[in-house]
Amino acid sequence: MYIDNIIEKLISGQNSFYSFETFILNLLKYHLKSQGKELTILETHRSLIIDAYIKDGFDNITGNTLIDIKINLNRYPPKLFLERFSKSNNSRLNDLNYSNYLVITANEVNEKLKEKYIEEFNNFHKNSNLNNFRFE
């Protein structure tokens, strides 16, 4: 079975968000284990939109990395999404000393929307320690 078929079944079922998030977090744990790294799952809280954290990065991503899992990023206006991130950027996240923010989404994000996210990201985070905003 192709990964696209698995993802499609996850996102079309009941409790699709939780199924997709659990699948991705477990996949990340497995992948990181092969690199001797650990995935820290952050406690779910309404004011905290980040799902997980990877110390010292992984693969070709260097530095502490925040992980945010979304089923469909295409439905979030970039400005609103990043305002929500900024508001939730509380002291607990700052203590993680992160430099990367990786958004993992089930649906492909079109190039125009990616550019808009990056533009809004640059507007919101000119003076922050965050230097890398990626979509996968």
Image (tube, grey):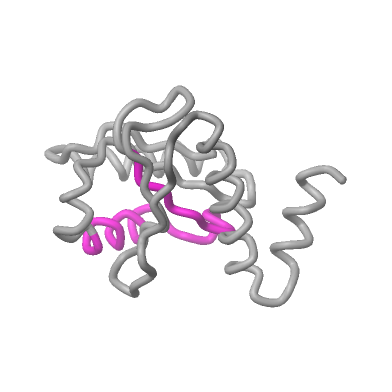
Which residue corresponds to the image point at 46% horizontal and 46% vertical from the top-left? 103
Q: Position of residue 10 (x, y in %)?
A: 72, 62
Q: Left of 78 or right of it: where is 93?
A: left
The answer to which of 73 and 136 lies nearer the viewer is 136
Q: Is 46 on the left or on the right of 76, as rendered?
A: left
In the picture as drawn, the residue positioned furthest to the top comes out as: 60
The quadrant holding residue 125 is: top left
Q: Does 70 appear above or below 64?
A: below
- Residue 108 shown in magenta: no
Q: Residue at x 64, y 66 (%)?
A: 19
- The C terminus: image quadrant: top right
Residue visible at 32% across and 54% down? Answer: 82
Assess whether residue 77 is covered by the magenta stretch: yes
Image position of 92 with respect to 60: above or below: below
Q: Is 35 above or below relative to 119?
A: above
The x and y percentages for residue 37 are 43, 36
Image position of 10 (left or right of 112): right
The location of residue 83, given as percent across then percent down, is 27, 59
Q: Residue at image x 73%, y 54%?
A: 7
The span picked out in magenta is 65-88
Above-or-below relation of 38 to 77: above
The outermost residue toward the right is 1
